[in-house]
Amino acid sequence: MNFYIAMNDLGQMNWNNANSACQNYSFCSNLKGSFPTLNQFETIHQNNSSINNLLLSNGGSQLTNDWYWVSTYDAAHFAYYISNPLSGSGGIGNDKDFYHVRPILTSW
């Protein structure tokens, strides 16, 4: 599975607004985006330097050194967030928390 990262963050927002923003984000050819999963965001972080260089060289913005929402939920139906760069830290947030959002487009 391949995925593509939006050129820019959508800002900081709560989980419900972030979820809607990702689902409404349009990539090329009007393809709709989605939230990255926890595993996909870990892959992004493993390649953080290369991704940031590509984003900048193509007119986008780097992944910020802050917290990002991911689509993965825990058993209590709270969403995970993860730090950038990946430092092994993250947590479980609720809808009142505000974190960064970066949509992805998944292709098979």
Image (cartoon, grey):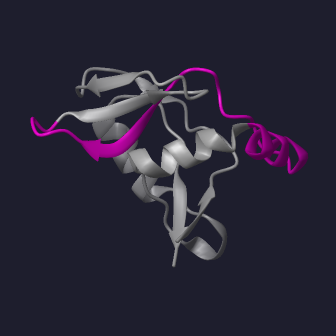
Please provide percent x and percent y for residue 96: 25, 21
Asked if residue 83 lies in the magenta stretch, the reply is no
Q: State whether residue 95 is above or below residue 71.
A: above
Figure check: 3 above or below 44? below
Q: Nearer the viewer, residue 46 or 53?
A: 46
Horizontal arrangement in the rendering, residue 43 relative to residue 12 (left or right): right
The image position of residue 13, as x and y in percent, is 41, 29
Determine whether, in the image, residue 74 is placed left or right of residue 52.
left
The part of the image, by quadrant, that contains residue 4 is bottom right
Query: Is residue 36 something that shows in the picture?
Result: no
Q: Is residue 28 above or below residue 73?
A: below
Q: Nearer the viewer, residue 74 or 97?
A: 74
Residue at x 60% of width, y 45% of height: 44
In percent of width and height, residue 90 lies at 39, 24
Task: Find the residue positioned furthest to the left.
Answer: 76
Please state which of residues 72 and 89 is positioned toward the viewer in this rendering.
89
Q: Is residue 12 visible?
A: yes
Q: Residue at x 67, y 42 (%)?
A: 8
Task: Look at the image and give the residue range highlighted in magenta.
Answer: 49-77
Instruction: Give me the residue at 34% from left, 29% from top.
Output: 14
**In this view, 62 is above or below 37:** above
Q: Quadrant of residue 50?
A: top right
